[in-house]
C-alpha cells in the first residue's frame, strides 16, 4: 500500500485500520490527491447477498463442526451449477 500511494498521501495509511463499512481510500491518476471517502448505501435490492453473519447464532443453528466440511462442499457444488 505504501508504495502505491504518492508521498503526500502516505499519512492516509494510518487511517486504514479505522475505516468503517462503506469507507475507502481513493488514489490514482483520476484523483488529484489521495482521499478518504464514504460511499452511499445501496438499496437493499441492489446489495450483494453477503451481510456480516452473527457467527454465534449460526454456530448454535448448525451444531458441531464434525460435518461442516461436507456442508461447505455441498453448497459449493450446488452454486457451481
Image (spheres, rainbow, N blue to C red):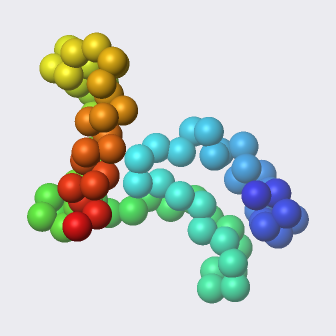
- Name the side, left or right, on which 65 lies relative to 60: right
Q: Which residue is drawn at 79% across and 67% down?
A: 4
- Name the side, left or right, on which 10 lies relative to 64: right
Task: Give 32 or 4, whichever is nearer the viewer.
Answer: 4
- Position above or below: 54 against 43: above
Say whether residue 42 is visible: no
- Name the side, left or right, on which 63 lies relative to 29: left
Q: Position of residue 46 (x, y in %)?
A: 19, 67
Task: Give 33 or 70, whichever is nearer the viewer.
Answer: 70
Q: Residue at x 32, y 28 (%)?
A: 68
- Position above or below: 16 against 4: above
Q: How many labels does the image show?
A: 0
Task: Give 79 or 27, whichever is nearer the viewer.
Answer: 79
Q: Where is residue 53, by image quadrant? A: top left
Say whether residue 54 is visible: yes
Quadrant (top left, top right, bottom left, bottom right) of the N terminus? bottom right
Q: Which residue is drawn at 33% across and 18% down?
A: 66
Q: Position of residue 14 (x, y in %)?
A: 72, 43
- Position above or below: 42 against 57: below
Q: Position of residue 21 (x, y in %)?
A: 41, 47
Q: Where is residue 54 in the image (x, y as percent from the top left)?
A: 27, 27
Q: Which residue is drawn at 39% across and 62% down?
A: 39
Which residue ends up furthest to the bottom in the rendered image?
30
Amino acid at each position: 500500500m505504501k508504495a502505491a500511494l504518492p508521498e503526500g498521501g502516505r499519512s492516509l495509511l494510518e487511517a486504514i485500520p479505522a475505516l468503517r463499512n462503506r469507507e475507502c481510500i481513493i488514489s490514482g491518476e483520476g484523483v488529484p490527491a489521495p482521499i478518504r471517502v464514504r460511499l452511499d448505501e445501496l438499496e437493499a435490492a441492489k446489495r450483494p447477498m453477503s451481510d456480516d453473519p452473527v457467527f454465534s447464532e449460526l454456530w448454535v443453528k448448525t451444531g458441531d463442526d464434525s460435518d461442516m466440511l461436507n456442508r461447505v462442499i455441498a453448497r459449493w457444488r450446488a452454486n457451481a451449477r
